[in-house]
Every structure is written in C-alpha cells, then in structure tokens.
Image: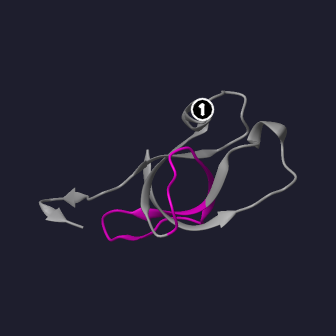
Amino acid sequence: MRVAKVIGNIWATRKEEKLNGLKLLVVQPLNLLNDGREGPPMVAADIIGAGVGEKVLIVGGSSARSAAGDTRIPVDATVVGIVDDQEIDGNLL
C-alpha cells in the first residue's frame, strides 16, 4: 500500500469493456518522510469516491485488480482509502 495525492481525473469514452463503470483518477505517489513526490503520476481506479486534492491509499498489482472487483480487470492501481490524518515519529503531518 502507498500514499498518494489525487491530482486529476481521467475520462475515456472508448476503453476495455471491463473498465466500464470505474472512475479513473490521476494520483501522485508521495514520500511520507518529506511529504514530497515519489515517482511519476499514475492512473488509478477509484472504488471509494475520492476527489481531487485528497490524500489516498492505493494498492497495486493483483491487490488492485482484486479490490476493483475482478482479478481480470486491467488495472495497475486502485484507490482503497482516503487518508484523514497521518502521524510519523509523533508528528501529525
């Protein structure tokens, strides 16, 4: 599981049939130690209703497909939670 920030939405009118009904978000993985970016942005399926500007939990690989509801869905990342707060070494971030 990783923490990311939702930075945008993706709309695709033509796509793989198994993606129909899934909301797609652009997420920026974060480095929690310095709250900086970690790697390039990615597209993630959203199953919980996250919005732009929110910090979220994402899973990848087979966990992403399973969370999206079917191990045959062609997704590499899925949003599985919205972060309310985070604390590292006793400091709320």
Quadrant, the C terminus: bottom left
Q: Residue at x 71, y 43 (%)?
A: 21
Q: Is residue 86 magenta?
A: no
Q: Residue at x 52, y 52 (%)?
A: 49
Residue sitting at the far top: 71
Quadrant, the N terminus: top left
Q: Position of residue 91 (x, y in %)?
A: 15, 65
Q: Which residue is mark 1?
A: 62
The residue closer to the viewer here, 92 or 35, is: 92
Q: Secondary structure at mark 1?
A: helix
The residue closer to the viewer here, 56 or 59, is: 56
Of the residues shown, which amino acid type is indicated by label 1?
Ser
In the image, the segment drawn in magenta is 26-52
Dot 1: within a 10 Å radius of its alpha carbon, few (fewer than 14), some, or many (20 or more) residues? some
Q: Residue at x 35, y 70 (%)?
A: 35
The answer to whether 22 is drawn above or below residue 42 in the figure is: above
Q: Position of residue 71 (x, y in %)?
A: 66, 27
Q: Is residue 34 magenta?
A: yes
Q: Is residue 53 left or right of residue 27?
A: left
Q: Position of residue 58 (x, y in %)?
A: 49, 48
Q: Is residue 55 left or right of residue 69?
A: left
The answer to whether 49 is drawn above or below residue 28 in the figure is: above
Residue sitting at the far right: 14
The answer to whether 69 is drawn above or below residue 57 in the figure is: above
The residue closer to the viewer here, 9 or 66, is: 9
